[in-house]
């Protein structure tokens, strides 16, 4: 079975509430879990929202290919500044981008 393990340098052993938004659509409430947590599924690519009630903190992990769209060119009279998003991320051996926050990480079980 495929899946991921959600681990944390900061929150191991803590109860968390996990919501999974797969890239394929929809939202899956994974309920209250204890970190580290194994999510075993063939449909594991998407965004995991991990709420830690003890600290009133939410972390998000993105697993898998980031959906992209092709922008339509627009003619403008003045240059439009492009915002820059600065974040920490890892690139898995298979090329997937893994976004982490505050020392949180995932491991592949594939």
Image (cartoon, rainbow, N blue to C red):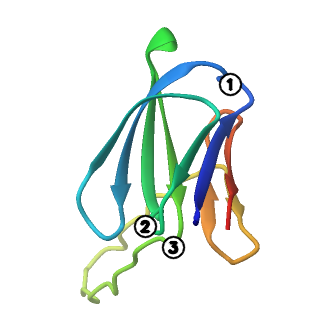
Q: Earlier in the sequence, mark 1 or mark 3?
A: 1
Above/below status of 26 relative to 96: above
Task: Give residue 104's quadrant in the image.
Answer: top right
Q: Which mark is residue 65?
A: 3
Question: How far is mark 1 from mark 3, CA to CA?
Answer: 26 Å
Of 19 and 109, which appears nearest the observer?
109
Question: How many other residues sit within 10 Å of disc 3, few (<14), some (14-19) or many (≥20)?
Answer: few
Q: Which mark is residue 12?
A: 1
Q: Position of residue 27 (x, y in %)?
A: 26, 52
Nearer mark to the viewer, of 2 and 3: 2
Q: Earlier in the sequence, mark 2 or mark 3?
A: 2
Question: Is 88 left, or right, of 21 in this rendering?
Answer: right
Name the element at disc 1.
Answer: loop
Seen at 70% across and 77% down, the residue is: 94
Q: Quadrant of the C terminus?
A: bottom right
Question: How far is mark 2 from mark 3, CA to CA?
Answer: 12 Å
Q: Position of residue 105 (x, y in %)?
A: 68, 44
Of 80 and 57, which appears nearest the observer?
57
Q: Position of residue 53 (x, y in %)?
A: 43, 15
Q: Position of residue 103 (x, y in %)?
A: 71, 35
Q: Which residue is mark 2?
A: 43
Above/below status of 13 relative to 63: above
Q: Which mark is residue 37?
A: none
Nearer mark to the viewer, of 1 and 3: 1
Name the element at disc 3.
Answer: loop
């Amino acid at each position: 079975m495929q899946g991921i393990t959600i681990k944390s340098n900061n929150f191991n052993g803590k109860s968390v509430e996990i919501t999974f938004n797969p890239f394929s659509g929809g939202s899956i409430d994974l309920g209250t879990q204890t970190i580290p947590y194994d999510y075993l599924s063939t449909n594991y690519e998407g965004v995991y929202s991990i709420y830690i009630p003890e600290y009133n903190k939410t972390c998000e992990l993105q697993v898998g290919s980031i959906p992209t769209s092709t922008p339509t060119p627009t003619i403008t009279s003045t240059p439009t500044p492009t915002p820059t998003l600065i974040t920490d991320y890892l690139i898995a051996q298979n090329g997937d981008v893994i976004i982490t926050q505050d020392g949180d990480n995932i491991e592949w079980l594939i």
